[in-house]
Image (cartoon, grey):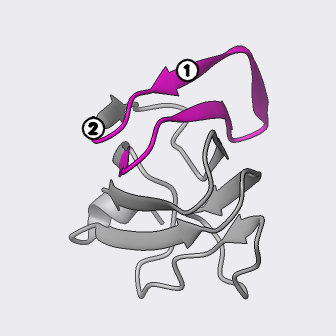
Amino acid sequence: MYATEKEGDNLEFNVAVISTVTIYLNQTGTNTATAIYPNADNVGTARKFAIIADKSFQINGMNSKTFTNPKTVTLNTWHAEKRNIPTIGKIVVRTTADDTNFKVRWF
């Protein structure tokens, strides 16, 4: 199932210390310091997503791909992507400061 079959969803979370965190849009589970699960009614892959944080961060990979050169996203700036194939099930981010607050929206 694709999240686009429903209305999409939102996710907000905090990363307390500088670390690499994986956001699993396509799975349910128990959140940890390094793994975030939306546990929404419409868990599935996304065709579109947008992410923002109150501090700068890096996108290090998506799905099973680790980027050679991570994408740096500056603080309070939305980063959005749209895909058809492959859809996005997992996003890997790396914080650059402690106490970073994220918001994610996906469809």
Counting from the top left corner in percent of width and height, residue 96 is at 63, 39
Q: Residues within 10 Å of mark 1 (few under 14, many from 20)?
A: some
Q: Nearer the viewer, residue 59 or 64?
A: 59
Counting from the top left corner in percent of width and height, residue 71 is at 55, 20
Given the image, on which type of amino acid does mark 1 rest? Lys
Residue 71: mark in rendering: 1
Instruction: Kindly identify the residue that appears in the image at 38 percent across and 58 percent down.
Output: 104
Q: Is residue 72 above or below residue 63?
A: above
Extreme-top residue of the structure: 69
Q: Image check: 16 left or right of 83?
A: right
| Residue bearing the label numbered 2 | 78
**Residue stretch rendered in magenta on the structure:** 52-77
Q: Nearer the viewer, residue 5 or 104?
A: 104
Instruction: Kindly identify the residue that appears in the image at 78 percent across and 27 percent down.
Output: 66
Q: Nearer the viewer, residue 54 or 63?
A: 54
Instruction: Kindly identify the residue that appears in the image at 44 percent across and 62 percent down.
Output: 101
Question: Tag 2's secondary structure?
Answer: loop
Q: CA distance from mark 1 to mark 2?
A: 13 Å
Q: Image check: 87 left or right of 104?
A: right
Quarter the C terminus occupies: bottom left
Query: Tag 2 or tag 1, which sits nearer the N-term?
Result: 1
Q: Main secondary structure of the magenta part?
A: strand
Given the image, on which type of amino acid does mark 2 rest? Trp
